[in-house]
């Protein structure tokens, strides 16, 4: 069964550095998402992406964050200048249709980002 | 903002026991999904419920969507250690691409 793959599985970076988290969504899916989960807390929506543009973003997704689908297969999340509070598991997800029509999300196994 | 509260937050039980996990909101959802998440992995979909009052069964797991579509429950019969994990309910925020997750129930089943 096709799956969402994320790299790297673990990224350690120093505060103020830029990081790029990478994802390869399922190939026939049209909607792409980034979620994060701070240790012990709930899964939080960051951003959704459809038709090569952001369709929704949360208040967490400020100017330090950006997403890109550079080549039709990869979907990346960039954090320009990391802060300690950015430490979390970052999950990429994709779906065939919008969640509003009960389309399930397929999640990757996440990237654990540790900012020191 | 629509919120989903789950209870209990933690549950530790012996193998063979039954349990129920609740997902509640003051808002109506067009559908609700249940996911299970194991350590170091992403959430994996268990089921989607769409119609108020709907009941879906997945082996020993029974999912119910409330008549008013504001709540849902997950009942596990004869729990096994393999059921251990974080159970998450999630629903779409109205008219958006955003899936809202509940606060989660961490289940531990001891042999």
Image: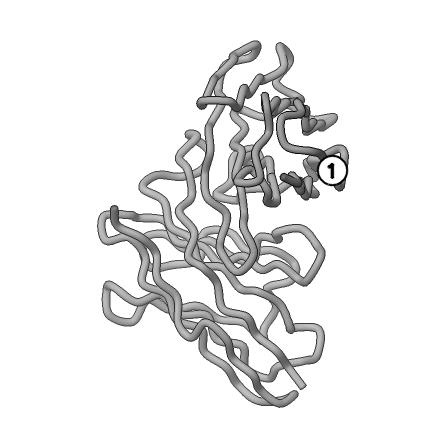
Quarter of the figure with the C terminus of chain A: bottom right
Which chain contains the residue that carries disc 1?
Answer: B
Is residue B104 something that shows in the picture? no
Q: Residue at x 63, y 39 (%)?
A: B111
Q: Residue at x 61, y 22 (%)?
A: B75
Residue occupying the far front of the picture: B111
Pick the front one: A22 or A5: A5
The image shows residue A107, relative to residue A104, as above or below, that is below
Q: Residue at x 42, y 43 (%)?
A: A105
User: Left of A40 or right of it: where is A10?
Assistant: left
**Image quarter of residue A6:** bottom left
Q: Residue at x 53, y 64 (%)?
A: A90
Pick the front one: A68 or A45: A45
Query: Mark 1 highlights which residue?
Result: B11
Helix, strand, or loop for circle 1?
Answer: strand
Pick the front one: A111 or A45: A111
């Amino acid at each position: 069964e096709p799956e969402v793959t994320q790299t790297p599985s673990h990224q350690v970076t120093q505060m103020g550095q830029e990081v790029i988290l990478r994802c390869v969504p399922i190939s026939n899916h049209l909607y792409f998402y980034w979620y994060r989960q701070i240790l012990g807390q709930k899964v939080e929506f960051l951003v959704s992406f459809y038709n090569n543009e952001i369709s929704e973003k949360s208040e967490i997704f400020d100017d330090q964050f950006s997403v890109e689908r550079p080549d039709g297969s990869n979907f990346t999340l960039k954090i320009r200048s990391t802060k300690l509070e950015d430490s979390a598991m970052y999950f990429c997800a994709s779906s065939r249709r919008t969640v509003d029509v009960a389309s399930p999300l397929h999640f990757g196994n996440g990237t654990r980002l540790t900012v020191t | 903002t629509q919120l989903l509260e789950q209870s209990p937050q933690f549950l530790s039980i012996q193998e063979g026991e039954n349990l129920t996990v609740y997902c509640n909101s003051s808002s109506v959802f067009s559908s609700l999904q249940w996911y299970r998440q194991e350590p170091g992995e992403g959430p994996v979909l268990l089921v989607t419920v769409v119609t108020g009052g709907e009941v879906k069964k997945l082996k020993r797991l029974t999912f119910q969507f409330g008549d008013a579509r504001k709540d849902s429950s997950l009942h596990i019969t004869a729990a096994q250690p393999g059921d251990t994990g974080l159970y998450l309910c999630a629903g779409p925020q109205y008219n958006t691409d955003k899936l809202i997750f509940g606060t989660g129930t961490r289940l531990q089943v001891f042999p």
